[in-house]
Amino acid sequence: MSGDPNEIPPEEKLNAVYRLTTGLVQQMEKARIAEYTQLLNSPWRLVWLNVLSGTARGLGIALGFTFFAATIIYVLQVLGALNLPIIGDYIADIVRIVQHQLELKTF
């Protein structure tokens, strides 16, 4: 064979097209395009899923920030208890300010 496309038997061409088509179908199934188009065709379901995911994201951010802030305040209290010369007074002031602000909040 010299590489001329006309010399390839039709069965091989058909098999190559079949393999390419099968590969494209598998990639489309992995991409879940059918589910995506169904979701776009039902706007109320799309809105509901967006509200639900936004609520979950907001709750996660709130919990994560609370944990992070509590950890920072705890570390600052521990460092303040060590009575480091300059840093200890500064950290103690920060902790006092935060605790005072928390006492003022009457939810």
Image (tube, rainbow, N blue to C red):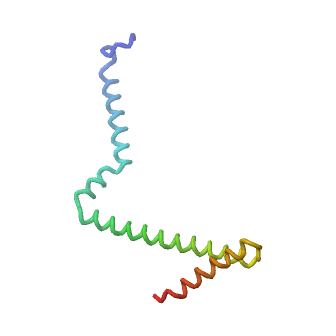
Callout count: 0
* Front-most of residues 9 and 52: 52
Q: Pick the quarter of the image with the C terminus.
A: bottom left
Q: Is residue 12 left or right of residue 102?
A: left
Image point (27%, 65%), residue name:
45
Farthest bottom residue in view = 106
Say above or below: 2 vs 36.
above
* Front-most of residues 84 and 34: 84
Image point (37%, 38%), residue name:
23
* Front-most of residues 35 and 75: 75
Say above or below: 53 vs 18.
below
Image point (34%, 13%), residue name:
4
Image point (33%, 42%), residue name:
25
Say above or below: 14 vs 106.
above
* Front-most of residues 57 and 90: 90
Q: Find residue 24 and report its horizontal and vertical position in percent.
A: 34, 39
Q: Is residue 87 left or right of residue 1?
A: right
Q: Find residue 52 and report its horizontal and vertical position in percent.
A: 36, 69
Farthest top residue in view = 2
Q: Pick the quarter of the image with the N terminus.
A: top left
Q: Find residue 58 and report its horizontal and vertical position in percent.
A: 42, 70
Say above or below: 18 vs 97.
above
